[in-house]
């Protein structure tokens, strides 16, 4: 259920919406967190559209009940002002006997970056964690200085980066700040099967005791440069290589190649190749095996990350190392 | 007399408000903002609920010439704009006919006999016994001349016999200890303490009243309310608005006087007080006074260490640019008045030894929100709290005063799935969704209490003066540092970085509202 509103009437209109919906039967308000979804669109052609944004947020809320605040943000306005369009919504789930619902607030904003925090702070609910989900290419549209710190968790997707080096630099900068939020990279999550496959592959290769950067050869498809850098950063950070040790990273000419890594150490080698569905691992002495890549929608990925509060130290280390490697 | 005794005996079995006797409420400043926004809508809602005495008159008075009809229109406008319930045309006439207006210059001695004559007429026509409530909705500079005029005109009878006379005093009661004592003294020369109702509208809010119920009607909270289990307490009163139309008053007052000296210390007292042995007004107020008297003084260098003051600079609210305090209409361009204050406070008694209470209030903060959060000590870092990168959120009991009155208990819960992941969840109680109807406004409850003669929720003279006595060293220190630069915070932020440092230096953080 959606309704037009205005900046000053958001809470009042939401309350009215709850009252009206509750007349149809018992209804509980569910609130585990605030989810601030920010979509920056200075190019209308790239705008995923308000409807898509609302649908995605609703799907997330079904899995992890959040107050979703959707900011469709157009930057570059010289004279900032109040949101030009506001809608409030209520999405309900569950059976009629045990219905629960979540708040949805959608705003179209044309304003200076500096004014976004004032909107977010006004609309988030206290007493529950706030997660900021930055949709779109963070390397192309860096978030405002304060934005990541508005929440306890900052979600992004490095797979969308056109300029992975810039993206890593930005994320590393956020991590380095005092009181930095917990970073959650949806792409890092998708790469978890690759990391698990490598760990398992090395664990079952009897002679694999030492690995240097010179023994690492990473190949990636045209759109997977961020994956390759993160993988290299993960190995670099986890194995404590010096900054002078740089693994080989190459873009594959084969369009079918997604991401692969060959790890060698003299008389042993392990190769892991990842596509959308599985990671296949082969080794010098072991039988090939595969690790399934779970099929998750973006909403499922976000909903799965929201309860993971606390710094992902492996991601932090990988980003820090990858940012250095990217230089 | 026999009839009156019979009525009292019958009323004894009814709810307390049934004891409210017929009375005339005289509002000095009756055409002002407070009457328009709060008092008249509150009286109207009491009327709709059938809680006003069956016979009543409300007489507004002010400097400007007006008529009863014009005053009724003024009241109607206020009700239509600010009442929690809409205008009920069927009920309006019976309320409107109880409204009157008298033109009055409070400093003109000849005016009061005229007022008296009009009140006598109204009371005669409406069958009122002469019980009167005088509401001083005027600047505090007029408190003294007004009560003196009331005395001179013979409007104030004995506290023990005859029709009652009560006076309601609005804040601010003074701007420092000497001026507060002078006001109290002037009022005390005319009214007995039992006749004086110093209003702090925060104490009339449902959730604030619920603090005592929460603590003393539930067996599992009170055993935790002490230094063994509580890590710290935060009290926040955040205002979204700037100084607005109150620049004249506010620029002379500032956040410490406007909020901390009264509302926030009262909230602190309710959270920290010992269990009273009864709910009698003076027993409860004695216990609250104990807390204020137990506050560790903040003096000299401690003011610099434990108190942060700041002023809002230009910023944004809901995406819109807003001016800084010094650019607000009516504010001195070089004003050093604080619009934000944060304090670290200790209560030096057995129960709260070593537990810091963090208080903060400010204007032009991101939203209007007031709450008290009681933070329990963290569990040992042995089982689920071992990972330093993912420390568990300690349990927090939050009392939301406004908006969304209610309370929440934050606990940790396992996220479903194969791994042990802990997530903070709330057990939440919300007044409006639990009890359905909207809560009465604070002024409704407080006006009803004055009518019923119950002073429990009103400030006693000793409490007001104790609060000022504790505040004074802070004001004195600031006066010594008058030329020191004042920290600023951008409008729309949660306060200055100095306030973050204040709490973060103790290993804690401000709670996000």
Image (cartoon, rainbow, N blue to C red):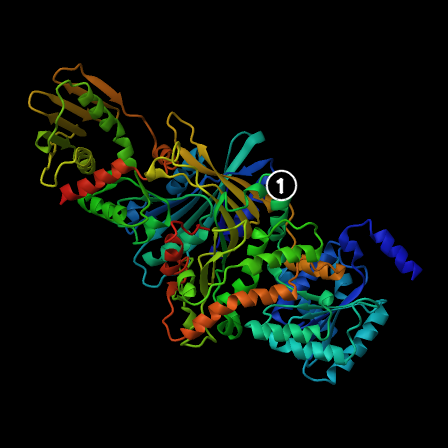
Quarter of the image where one finds residue A77: bottom left
Reply above or below: A205 against B275: above
Q: Quadrant of the N terminus of chain B?
A: bottom right
Residue B332: x percent and y percent? 44, 77
Q: Nearer the viewer, residue B457 or A278?
A: B457
Residue lying furthest front in this view?
A: B350
Residue at horizontal 53%, vertical 73%?
B249
Q: Is residue B252 visible?
A: yes
Determine the secondary structure under disc 1. loop
Reply above or below: B121 against B512: below
Q: Nearer the viewer, residue A305 or B89?
A: A305
Tally the marks.
1
Residue B373 horizontal side relative to residue B436, left or right: left
Residue lying furthest left in this view?
A: A266
Residue lying furthest right in this view?
A: B2
Residue A97: x percent and y percent? 58, 30
Reply above or below: B62 against A276: below
Residue B34 horizontal side relative to residue B325, left or right: right
Q: Nearer the viewer, residue A141 or A216?
A: A216
Quarter of the image where one finds residue B24: bottom right
Residue at horizontal 40%, vertical 52%?
A120
Q: Is residue B89 visible?
A: no
Residue B212 horizontal side relative to residue B371, left or right: right
Residue B369: x percent and y percent? 51, 55
Quarter of the image where one finds residue B17: bottom right
Residue A44 horizontal side relative to residue B152, left or right: left
Query: How busy is the neighbourhood of tag 1: few (under 14 within 10 Å), some, or many (20 plus)?
Result: few
Q: Nearer the viewer, residue A70 or B17?
A: B17
Residue at horizontal 45%, vertical 63%?
B341
Indicate the chain on which mark 1 is placed: B
- Provide the residue designation for mark 1: B218
Residue A128: x percent and y percent? 45, 43
């Amino acid at each position: 259920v959606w309704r037009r509103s205005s900046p000053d009437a958001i809470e009042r209109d939401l309350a009215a919406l709850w009252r009206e919906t509750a007349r149809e039967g018992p209804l509980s308000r569910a609130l585990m967190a605030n989810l601030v979804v920010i979509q920056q669109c200075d190019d209308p052609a790239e705008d995923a559209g308000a409807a898509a944004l609302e649908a995605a947020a609703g799907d997330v809320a079904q899995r992890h009940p959040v107050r979703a605040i959707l900011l469709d943000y157009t930057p570059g306005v010289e004279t900032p002002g109040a949101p030009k369009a506001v809608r409030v919504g209520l999405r309900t789930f569950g059976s009629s006997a045990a219905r629960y619902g979540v708040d949805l607030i959608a705003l179209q904003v044309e304003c200076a970056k500096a004014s976004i925090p004032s909107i977010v702070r006004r609309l988030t609910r206290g007493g529950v964690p706030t997660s900021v989900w930055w949709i779109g290419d963070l390397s192309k549209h860096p978030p405002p200085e304060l934005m990541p710190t508005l929440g306890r968790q900052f979600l992004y997707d490095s797979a969308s980066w056109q300029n992975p080096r810039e993206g890593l630099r930005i994320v590393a900068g956020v991590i380095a700040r005092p009181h930095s939020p917990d970073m959650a990279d949806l792409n890092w999550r998708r790469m978890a099967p690759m990391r698990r496959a490598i760990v398992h592959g090395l664990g079952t290769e009897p002679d694999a005791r030492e690995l240097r950067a010179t023994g690492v050869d990473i190949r990636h498809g045209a759109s997977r440069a961020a994956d390759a850098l993160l993988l290299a950063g993960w190995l670099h950070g986890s194995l404590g290589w010096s900054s002078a040790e740089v693994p080989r990273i190459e873009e594959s000419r084969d369009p079918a190649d997604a991401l692969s890594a060959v790890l060698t150490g003299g008389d042993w080698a392990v190769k892991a190749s990842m596509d959308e569905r599985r990671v296949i691992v082969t080794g010098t002495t072991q039988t090939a095996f595969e690790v399934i890549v779970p099929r998750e929608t973006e909403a499922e990925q976000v909903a799965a990350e929201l309860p993971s509060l606390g710094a992902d130290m492996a991601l932090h280390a990988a980003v820090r190392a990858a940012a250095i490697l990217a230089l | 007399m026999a009839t009156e005794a019979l009525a009292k005996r019958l009323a004894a079995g009814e709810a307390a408000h049934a004891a409210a006797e017929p009375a005339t409420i005289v509002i000095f400043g009756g055409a002002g903002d407070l009457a328009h926004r709060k008092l008249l809508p509150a009286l109207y809602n009491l009327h709709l609920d059938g809680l006003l005495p069956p016979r009543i008159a409300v007489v507004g008075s002010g400097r400007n010439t007006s008529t009863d009809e014009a005053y009724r229109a003024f009241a109607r406008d206020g009700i239509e704009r600010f009442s929690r319930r809409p205008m009920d045309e069927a009920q309006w006439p019976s309320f409107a006919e109880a409204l009157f207006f008298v033109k009055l210059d409070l400093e003109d001695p000849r005016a009061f006999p005229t007022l008296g004559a009009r009140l006598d007429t109204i009371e005669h026509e409406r069958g009122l016994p002469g019980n009167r409530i005088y509401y001083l909705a005027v600047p505090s500079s007029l408190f003294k001349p007004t009560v003196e005029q009331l005395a001179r005109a013979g409007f104030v009878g004995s506290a023990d016999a005859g029709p009652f006379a009560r006076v309601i005093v609005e804040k601010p009661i003074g701007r420092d200890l000497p001026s507060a004592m002078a006001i109290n003294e002037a009022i005390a020369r005319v009214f007995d303490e039992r006749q004086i109702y110093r209003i702090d509208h925060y104490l009339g809010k449902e959730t604030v009243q619920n603090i005592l119920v929460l603590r003393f009607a539930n067996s599992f909270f009170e055993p935790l309310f002490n230094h063994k289990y509580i890590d710290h307490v935060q009290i926040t009163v955040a205002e979204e608005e700037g100084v607005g139309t109150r620049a004249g008053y506010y620029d002379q007052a500032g956040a410490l006087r406007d909020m901390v000296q009264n509302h926030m210390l009262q909230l602190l007292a309710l959270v920290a007080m010992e269990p009273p042995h009864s709910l009698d007004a003076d027993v409860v107020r004695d216990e609250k006074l104990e807390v204020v008297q137990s506050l560790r003084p903040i003096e000299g260098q401690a003011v610099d260490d434990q108190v942060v003051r700041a002023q809002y600079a230009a910023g944004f609210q809901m995406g819109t640019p807003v001016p800084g305090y010094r650019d607000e209409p009516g504010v001195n361009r070089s004003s050093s008045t604080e619009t934000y204050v944060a304090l670290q406070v200790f209560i030096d008694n057995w129960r709260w030894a070593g537990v810091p209470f963090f208080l903060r209030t400010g204007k032009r903060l991101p939203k209007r929100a007031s709450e008290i959060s009681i933070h329990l000590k963290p569990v040992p870092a042995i089982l689920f709290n071992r990972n330093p990168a993912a420390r568990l959120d300690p349990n927090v009991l939050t009392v939301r005063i406004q908006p969304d009155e209610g309370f929440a208990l934050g606990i940790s819960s396992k996220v479903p799935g194969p791994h042990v992941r802990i997530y903070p969840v709330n057990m939440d109680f919300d007044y409006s969704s639990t009890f359905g109807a909207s809560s009465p406004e604070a002024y409704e409850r407080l006006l009803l209490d004055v009518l019923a003669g119950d002073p429990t929720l009103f400030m006693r003279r000793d409490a007001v003066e104790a609060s000022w006595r504790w505040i004074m060293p802070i004001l004195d220190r600031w006066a010594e540092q008058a030329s020191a630069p004042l920290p600023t915070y951008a409008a729309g932020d949660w306060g200055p970085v100095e306030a973050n440092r204040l709490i973060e230096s103790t290993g804690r953080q401000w709670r996000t509202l």
